[in-house]
Image (tube, rainbow, N blue to C red):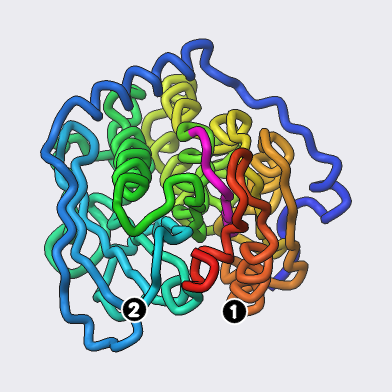
Amino acid sequence: MPLTDLTLAECLALRPDLDEPADLDAFWDRTVREARAGGDAPLFVPVDSGLTGVTTYDATVPGFAGEPVRGWLHLPVGADGPLGCVVEFLGYGRGRGLPHEQVLWANAGYAHFIMDTRGQGWSTAGGDTPDTAALNGTVPGFLTRGVESPHDHYYRRVFTDAVLCVEAVREHPAVDPARVVVTGISQGGGIALAVAGLVPGLAGVMPDVPYLCDIRRGARIAAQPPYTEVAEYLRLHRDRTETVFTTLSYVDAALLAARATAPALFSIAMMDEICPPSTCFAAYHRYGGPKDLRVYEFNGHEGGGGHHRREQLAWLRELPAPPGTHTALSALHDPQLA
């Protein structure tokens, strides 16, 4: 797997000048405010996952336009008191899956919420959370859905779903609202960065090989989908380049990450042909809060894998308590300290 992007030294020195819409903050403030006004209360229904150490709830949260977004909430059995919570967003094309499949964070003693991604996944047509918008791109995939207008774009809906899921989790009685961390790999990492810029007061952010960062550069240099969807769209629609990239600037996670204030742990892989490292570094350098980084020099889009999960577990244990609190995030899974 060859090095197809900038070297590590070049990426560390990179400071890209990204085009930011003048009304970016107003656009997202209005979008989230309108979404909060619709839909029913969140619903958490216990399910039998077959596991004895984790209690799982089938979650339904009102998302964009009040539309139901599905998820799993995992809680460690026997935990006492409100828990630190890891909210996880999923990679491209993945849905929430089965309730027993992803329980690492609950086994580590945290509450763990997994958000289904609208229109993605496999358990039903379009996943457990369908995307009800009729708009589709000219090419297969999600990045060009509604790409003629930021109001219609697919990721406007997804990012709004994610913000409202974090807010719903914060209100759950098993979760300490001051100790919520967001994470995700690839698409999930981009969503986590967007949420970090849109939701104040998060305890931490852990984006891995994040997608949706410096989208214009990604469309120019990525060797593999999904960024290639944009290049394919513009190959067919030669006259729409600026319209497309103006729309995509509203959902560029590198721009939204500049608004974040929570501590962050990034991972970036230098031989990544799907999310080229220079695009990930664009988000890292612009990130607004304190930040740390793990670079996997000889890995592709798989990133750090289990090695990086170990890094994340250690990072969370050392994460300082948010201002005004007295207990570290990791202490919240210990009944003696709750």
Q: Residue at x 33, y 59 (%)?
A: 174
Q: Is residue 293 above or below residue 335?
A: above
Locate residue 127, reporting x and y percent: 19, 60
Circles 1 and 2: CB distance less than 8 Å? no
In the image, 74 versus 6, the foreground residue is 74
Locate residue 334, reporting x and y percent: 51, 72
- 265 relative position to 297: left or right: left
For mark 2, what is the residue? 77
Element under disc 2:
loop
- Dot 1 or dot 2: first in sequence order is 2
Q: State which quadrant residue 302 falls in.
A: bottom right
Question: Which mark, residue 306?
Answer: 1
Q: Taking the image as drawn, is residue 154 in sight?
A: no
Label 2 sits on what residue type? Answer: Val
Q: Taking the image as drawn, is residue 290 in sight?
A: yes
Residue 201 in the magenta stretch? The answer is: yes
Label 1 sits on what residue type? Answer: Gly
Q: Is residue 107 above or below residue 269?
A: below
Residue 35 in the magenta stretch? The answer is: no
Element under disc 1:
helix
